[in-house]
Image (cartoon, helix red, strand yellow):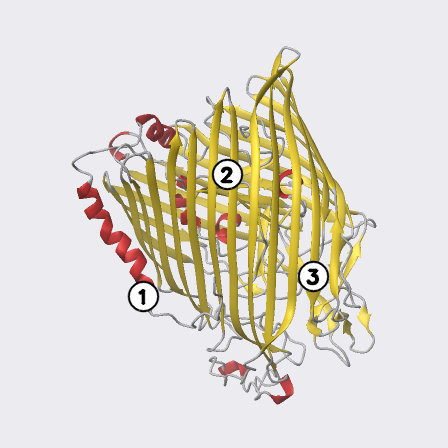
Amino acid sequence: MDFAPLPRRASRARRHLLPVALLAALPAAATAQEAEPATLPAVEVKAEATQPYIVKETGAATRLPLSLRETPQSVTVFTRQRLEDQNLQSMRDVLDNTPGIYSYAYDSERVVFTARGFVIDNLLYDNIPASTVFSTGSIDETVETAMYERIEIVRGATGLLSGAGNPAAAVNLVRKRADSRGFEALSSLSVGSWNDYRTVADLSTPLTADGSVRARVVGVYQGRDSYQALYSNEKQAFYATVAADLGPETVLSLGYDYLETQPQANTWGSFPLFYSDGTRTDWRRSITTAANWSFWNKRTETLFAELQHDFGGGWSLNATLTHRELGSDSALFYMEGYPDPTTGEGLIPYAYRSSEGGQMNSLDLFAKGPFELFGRKHEVVVGANHSRLKLDGYEFAAPPPEELPPTGNFFEWDGSYPEPVFSTTGDRITSITTDQTALYAAYRFSLADPLKLIAGLRYTRWDTDYFDLYSDDQAFVYKEHPITPYAGLIYDFLPQWTAFASYTEIFKPQNKLDRNASFLDPTTGQSVEIGIKGEHFGGRLNTALTLFDTRQDNVAALDEEIDPDTGLPYTVPGRPLSQASVNVDGARSRGFELEVSGQPIQGWNLSLGWSNLSLEDADGNGLNRYVPHTMVRSFTSWTPQGAWNKLTLGGGVNWQSKSKATVYAPGTPDPVATELGQSPVTLVSLLARYEVTENFSVQLNGNNLLDRKYYVLDEYGNLYFGTPSSGSVTLNLRF
């Protein structure tokens, strides 16, 4: 597939074509189905109605089909209903409402997610590992939730399924399936703050009279401005899948998805925190350092084929082949320094132009089923997978800062800075090839009626050939073959209560560079979890309390030592804007996570999470202090019974404790390190929905209703303001 630079601004008419065509087709398709009406089985409708925030089982932790109570780790599941209630549209929307997870951003396009103090770098599609975002080392923020039936988050180390990775969390995206043998259609139109317009269409239909071949199509278009001045973004997503019954026990599924984002006047880095005289700035939340010509377009395309066969007796085989294409194209602008408090002058301009492209191919095969041993029934899953990721990056040379025009008075900044003349020929700056081959097995042994043991082992062959222009022009090669054990013990000590303990080991190659432009050694360690889980009211409500303790060596941290030549912390050679990193031994992350989710009484759904974290090095010094240590994530919805049953009301409160980051203020003769603190933050959200008819509803969502102004902190001091008070109205139509 061609990954030539994307157009900076596509035609709005063309971009509306797909969603509008889908929306227009829905009534016609509904009429065509009238002659042979078909609906979902009643039992499925009932299950969704009575347990909208609950799933019966998940394989996100071990691939064994386990309930949340039977899974010996912290697990949060966002069902389709929960996603729609909160109007969660992107990965960041979801994870910002997940217990124990904190997100921050280097600028408007590079978002990083953390859990338990570490970066989340494990993303899976239907339990199959995918690549992370190269520019952040974290998972993709642009993921469009409309394409997924649910999103599962397993906190802690997940090496059994994902292989190498941080002991933070793994996010599993469960795709929508073509499983309806009758016609179904959903569409929505929403309008939100800052000219946010969004359309979604979701169509399911049989392709044969008996429904043995079925299709599903999802289309999304969104165009929006922002509270940040000048910024706008367009997003187009498309997903199509076909499922065919090859026999009574065999199903073949083919699928394709496409996601493209086109931000304009996006930022690259943050804004000045101090004036040249050392006093603090106090900007409006609309502050930006972007030029009106800057952009950072990204595109992802995926093809997959999946074969499922049921052998009977509980045994099944699943094989999945995936091909994914990745591409990005950017022209960026940044201003560094401290403006004069009177004239607004003194900022240094930087310009950058690049493109990246790559592909990931993977094959995954696993079988699972029950077996008997010593008179008891047990379960096993055995699998193998192989993937190859290739990424290439190119830089188009820009004039150096001293040759760029001055930025002028920053108090009057409107983005109208002349676009530099970039080179028309790109120089290769990165070339990465990563091969990962793994064999794994997990067993669930029934030692006694109330006692179960989960034991697993993964062997991984991890080979990486990593070339970076700034790393002495030498390719860096990893060849590691770790073995990752996993063990979990589950004991039902009361009918509704289970105690559990789990253990796994950690292996994570790193692409962080030190002051000599050398890569840091891989991170290694162990993670232990113990806790209590409950299942109440016939399975309608889940509770969990987890205590975790993770210990690691070779954990990347910023190199805070001062370079005598610059008076600032060491940077990576060839990258004056990138602070160098060092490995820290004896890092320890420990704390607890408390979660309650489900429907305790008819019509009342709730989700509540409370987490606390302590992250220190071997000497007891705090690490990653920009991550709040305590967080609360809550949301609830209520549908009255009786005459008011068409009305749904809800809301939530997200709270985080204080945090701090190291920033640099002007000094004599060199900048001075200082701490900037963010006080506790409380964010309040609102939901109101009314079913006008059985097929039509109107929904209102509001976020940050108290209009709290706050900083989002990161490790580099790239601070920015959180989103102000906002709202949206959504019209939902269902056939």
Which one is closest to the eye, mark 2 or mark 3? 3
Q: Is residue 494 left or right of residue 504?
A: left
Disc 1 residue type? Arg
Disc 2 residue type? Val
Residue that badge 2 annotates: 77
Q: Nearer the viewer, residue 711 or 567?
A: 567
Q: Which residue appears at 51% of the width and 54% of the height?
A: 324
Disc 3 residue type? Tyr
CB atoms of marks 2 and 1 within 8 Å: no
Residue that badge 1 annotates: 14
Residue 113's tag is none
Q: Position of residue 433 (x, y in %)?
A: 65, 58
Residue 466's tag is 3
Which numbered disc flags the more N-terminal residue, 2 or 1? 1
Q: Nearer the viewer, residue 536 or 214?
A: 214
Which one is closest to the eye, mark 2 or mark 1? 1
Q: Is residue 537 above or below residue 153?
A: above
